[in-house]
Image (spheres, rainbow, N blue to C red):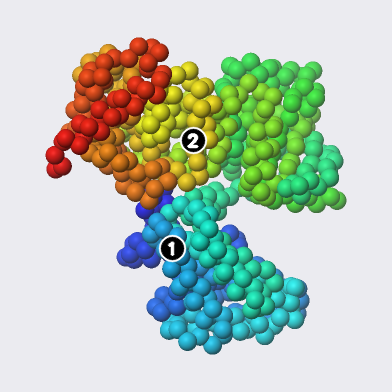
Amino acid sequence: MNIILESHVKTISDDFDFDEKELSKKFELFCNYCIVSKHFFGRFNPIVVTTDEDDASIDGIAFIIDGELITTTDDAEAIFKRPKNNVSVDVIFTQIKSGEKFSKDEIANFKIGLEDFLSLNPKLPNGSFNVEALQILRIVFANLRKIRNKRPNCQVYYCTSGVYKSQREISASFGIIERHISETDYFNKVSVIPLGRGELISLYTEISEKNEAKLKLIEYFGMPAMNGIPQSYVALVNASDFIKALVEDSEGNLRESIFEENVRSFLGNKNDVNVAIQETLNSPDKKSLFSVLNNGITIVAPELTLTPNTKELDLANYQIINGCQTSTTLHENKKFLNKDVNVVVKFIESPDNEFSGDIIAATNSQSDIPKESFLGLRNKAKLVQRYFKAQNEKQAHENHIFFERRQNEYKHAGYQSTRIFDVREVARCYAAMFLDLPHNAARYVNNIFSSSGDLLFKEDDNESYYYASCLALYKYHTLINGRKINAHNYIKVRWHIIHLFKFFCSGETAIPLPNSNKAEKFALKLITTLNSENKSHIKIFERCQKVIDTIGFPTSDELKRSKFSAEIMAEAIKSVKKTPKK
């Protein structure tokens, strides 16, 4: 199982004391917890929505009625006895496979289980959990007159620990499930949603790091609804209120998580812009002019609720996408804030991540931010960063490396510079080692993005490849800096060295593609060798250097040509084929 996903599964298992259960069952409980938490905001144990004995190919069933999680027939009957109509009802079904594949046969089995269950007179074996759920469903159907739209909604989720790819047969299989459930006419809306590890990790992050706030606005005006943006406001708010409500936590510390979608991290107190902000706040004459002297702040949230008569705005899962410098500087100088210091804030509701990305790019397009920095905002880049963190939790301190996804993110963290890889370096390492493009990595750094940008941080890439390539360069750099095995003489071909490393380390000539199910297992072999206490990677790097010696050291021009890369790769593959398998 993917290391990030495994870490999250362990967290939920520890929280609910599932230690005695097998990993596959823990994964079921984890998935059901994440899915139901998306619809129900209260506390619950995932056991109450997870099937146990005979499950008829259904791993989870949940009923969210009038905002409550209903798990017994008694509760279902009681909630419909209330003198209330227009009650919202969501029925959730899940099927969860801990394997990496989205299998057409397994999806077909899930469809059979759903068909049988929704017949209301199932023939397949059903345990006590399913029997109780069936009774609750019957109670729901007996109270349609009280239900919003006179029918409940149905959400169906199919989960695996692999990467979901919208292949024709698999997509069609999910479409058949959706069509069949819709044709029962039991439900108002039906959705069938496949969740791979990327979606599950994002879902877990969303529910575990949810931030909510309420802010009083001084004045505001609303903009017309736009495609993908139901509502947006430009508002004047008191700076102190803004900091207390949105920027700091209950202990007065800066909420770093709200800047996840910001291209740049805080540039420090000595940055020219931030110095100017501080000077304005410290000036009795200028501080009241702050709202017109400052460019303002932009916030995106999937959910905004404005109460016009009180001018209060409620936000959930918000991100400050532009204004990290202003927000952080205001926080650091909050003792100078009073009722005269106001700031202009643009609030944008964008439930769709695709539109959020466009907004982030547009609001930062006028600043001096390198274009490749926007790669760090891709969902895959976030997962890669989490993979780095998960590996660091497992590895000895001397093997820690860090992915600085946002500019200057680790500037004040105290890490050695050689251990920090920014978006450029991560991209170069990955392209050199696993895209077989060391010649591009060796060229002017911007060329890696113009020539290979579409191949970087793709949604179906395995995160382990990015980590393994950076770890390889880090380990080779330690040899260069330590002047061991004459590595310092090969510094110009370091990208080619890590390119060759994967062949000699694995003993394989056919390398799994980045989106292959075999990718992580392959990467872990490299990672284990690079982090081994016996430092076996050093001899492998020596073999890589010998290949360079055999072909001949390239000129500066040859170094940047694909011909040299192809020659040394062919030589390495020939050498590996000659080496007896252990």
What type is the residue that disc 1 sits on? Answer: Ser
Is 512 positioned to the left or the right of 143 in the image? left
Q: Where is residue 184, by image quadrant?
A: bottom right
Is 476 positioned to the left or the right of 100 in the image? left
- The residue wearing badge 1 is 103
Residue shown at 25% from the left, 33% from the top: 573
Q: In the structure shown, which secondary structural element does the residue marked by tag 1 occupy?
A: loop
Residue shown at 54% from the left, 48% from the top: 209
Circle 1 Cα neighbour tier, 10 Å, few/some/many (<14 / 14–19 / ≥20) = some
Question: x and y percent of residue 50 in the render?
Answer: 46, 70
Is 28 positioned to the left or the right of 259 in the image? left
Q: Where is residue 389, by image quadrant?
A: top left
- The residue wearing badge 2 is 456
Residue shown at 60% from the left, 62% from the top: 39
From this viewpoint, is residue 152 visible?
no
Q: Earlier in the sequence, mark 1 or mark 2?
A: 1
Q: Compared to 224, does 191 lie above or below?
A: below
Question: x and y percent of residue 22 in the render?
Answer: 33, 64
Residue shown at 83% from the left, 42% from the top: 223
What type is the residue that disc 2 sits on? Answer: Leu
Circle 2 Cα neighbour tier, 10 Å, few/some/many (<14 / 14–19 / ≥20) = many
Question: x and y percent of residue 47 in the render?
Answer: 45, 69
Q: Compared to 50, does 159 lie above or below?
A: above
Of residues 215 and 446, the one drawn nearer to the viewer in this rendering = 446
Q: Which mark is residue 59?
A: none
Number of numbered discs present?
2
